[in-house]
């Protein structure tokens, strides 16, 4: 069996898989390459009758550029481009173009107009290691707060995680104030970011730009502009250190890490669709493919 999640039990999932088999002429015995597998995962979501747009915390959100979208209608626009592409290109063509970061070019050769995507800063691709940081943090926060204790983002073996903070990439830990926090502070920060990311005025790229500004006050000023008085809301005189939150006191240095730990589907994202055994099998499958 090679089509991911083909053991799904809900009608909208099963019908999406049937549709997928028809569009790409694949079946359960088709041997998929790693990138074909990821593309199939994408269309397995897009072809559903509802719940058909990848969301923060789902692997496709980062892998296929939905993280660049700041509104629901932008995500729908990107999804529409992928759906259009599927009727003009084969699974292998899409997979190869995705792998080599050439989906925009492929769309152009198939006469699909991408100007509306570009004008919104949306790219059908996975962000580069230099720009992925903020999207990775958004994904990590979603995963941690969803409490998926059994999922692979709690990775003690990843070289880009510290021993103190196995659920966050070191870049997130240091750049966004998690380093050397106590348990209560960490929990405060996670919830704070989670609500910040839902703020209608929040823009990932602006936050990241503010974070990387040499003037360390810019970062806090950006947050303050979205959540006036945020420091007072975060602090608790009994539970937090006097210096908390230590935003912008440290900066991640060195090459941007290639950490994929939070880029995978969550066990809770579809309720009980796979069951633990199916879920573990899919996770193991995804991990093996990430490494190829
Ligand atoms: Zn998780
Ligand atoms: Zn996870
Ligand atoms: Zn990692």
Image (cartoon, grey):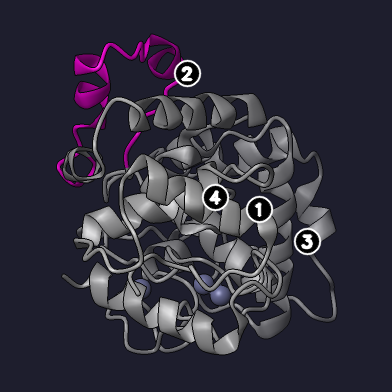
Is residue 101 located in the magenta-colored stretch of the structure? yes
Measured Cα–Cα span from mark 4 to mark 2: 29 Å
Residue identifier under label 2: 120
- Give the quarter of the image for residue 72: top right
Q: Kindly report which numbered mark, 1 or 2, lies closer to the viewer in this rendering.
A: 1
**Stretch of the chain drawn in magenta:** 98-125
Does residue 61 show up? no
Residue identifier under label 4: 16
Q: Position of residue 125 (x, y in %)?
A: 32, 39
Residue identifier under label 1: 12
Q: Nearer the viewer, residue 124 or 49?
A: 49
Chain-order first, disc 3 or disc 2: 2
Measured Cα–Cα span from mark 4 to mark 1: 6 Å
On screen, residue 224 above or below 73: below
Query: In this rendering, would 196 be left or right of 211?
Result: right
Label annotation for residue 234: 3
- Contact, mark 1 vs mark 3 (Cβ under 8 Å): no
**Element type at mark 1:** helix
On screen, residue 4 above or below 48: below
Q: Quadrant of the N terminus?
A: bottom left
**Element type at mark 4:** helix
């Amino acid at each position: 069996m090679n089509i991911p999640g083909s053991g799904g039990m809900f009608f909208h999932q099963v019908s999406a898989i049937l549709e997928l088999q028809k569009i790409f002429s694949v079946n359960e015995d088709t041997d998929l390459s790693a990138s074909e597998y990821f593309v199939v995962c994408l269309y397995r979501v897009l072809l559903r009758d509802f719940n058909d747009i990848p969301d923060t915390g789902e692997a496709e959100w980062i892998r296929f550029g939905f993280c660049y979208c700041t509104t629901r209608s932008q995500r729908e626009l990107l999804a529409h481009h992928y759906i259009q592409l599927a009727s003009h290109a084969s699974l292998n063509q899409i997979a190869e173009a995705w792998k080599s970061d050439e989906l925009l070019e492929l769309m152009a050769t198939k006469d699909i107009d991408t100007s509306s995507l570009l004008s919104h800063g949306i790219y059908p691709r996975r962000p580069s290691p230099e720009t992925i940081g903020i999207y990775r943090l958004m994904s990590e926060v979603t995963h941690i707060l969803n409490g998926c204790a059994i999922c692979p983002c709690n990775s003690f073996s990843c070289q880009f995680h510290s021993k103190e903070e196995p659920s966050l990439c070191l870049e997130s830990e240091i750049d966004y104030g998690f380093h050397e926090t106590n348990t209560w502070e960490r929990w405060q920060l996670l919830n704070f970011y989670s609500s910040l990311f839902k703020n209608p005025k929040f823009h990932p790229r602006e936050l990241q730009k503010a974070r990387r500004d040499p003037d360390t006050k810019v970062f806090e000023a950006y947050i303050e502009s979205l959540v006036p008085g945020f420091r007072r809301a975060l602090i608790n005189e009994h539970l937090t250190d006097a210096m908390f939150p230590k935003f912008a006191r440290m900066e991640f240095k060195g090459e941007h890490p290639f950490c994929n730990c939070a880029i995978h589907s969550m066990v809770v994202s579809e309720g009980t669709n796979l069951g633990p055994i199916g879920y573990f099998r899919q996770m193991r499958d995804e991990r093996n493919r990430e490494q190829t």
